[in-house]
Image (cartoon, grey):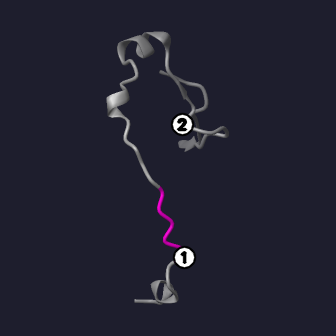
Amino acid sequence: MIGDQGRIVDGELLRPTAAGLGLTLTPEMEARYPFDETAVYSCALIDFGPPPDSYWAPA
């Protein structure tokens, strides 16, 4: 992997400025770990709406 965004400044890892983790897979890694369609899950987004006001009340 090539980290093209990770930088450490004053002992802190700066967050990426672009989408994702800021990593690029090398061609060798892509060849070693090919995409496996059976490993991908089908997800459904269910919107239950905002939580009730009681959710935000102090415990």
Query: Is 32 in front, or is 43?
Result: 43
Label 1 SS: loop
Q: Quadrant of residue 13?
A: top right
In x, y percent, where is residue 24? 54, 23
Verify whether residue 43 appears in magenta: no
The answer to whether 19 appears left or right of 26 in the picture is right
Q: Nearer the viewer, residue 40 or 29?
A: 40
**As drawn, 42 above or below 57:** above
In this rendering, position of residue 49 left or right of residue 29 = right
The residue shown at (51%, 66%) is 47
Magenta-highlighted residues: 45-50
Q: Residue at x 61, y 31 (%)?
A: 5
Q: Look at label 1 and name its amino acid.
A: Pro
What secondary structure characterizes most of the magenta part? loop
Q: Is the residue 33 above or below the residue 5 in the image?
A: above
Q: CA distance from mark 1 to mark 2?
A: 29 Å
Disc 2 target residue: 21
Residue at 39% over, 18% down: 34
Residue 23 coordinates in the image, percent (x, y): 53, 28
Q: Kindly report which numbered mark, 1 or 2, lies closer to the viewer in this rendering.
A: 1
* Foreground pick, 30 / 48: 48
Residue 17, position as x, y percentages in the image: 67, 40
**Displayed quadrant of residue 10:** top right
Query: For mark 2, does the 10 Å Cα neighbourhood hold few (<14), some (14 to 19), or many (20 or more) residues?
Result: few
Identify the image quadrant of the C terminus. bottom left
Which residue matches tag 1?
Answer: 50
Q: Is residue 15 left or right of residue 31?
A: right
| Residue 47 painted magenta | yes
For label 2, the SS is loop
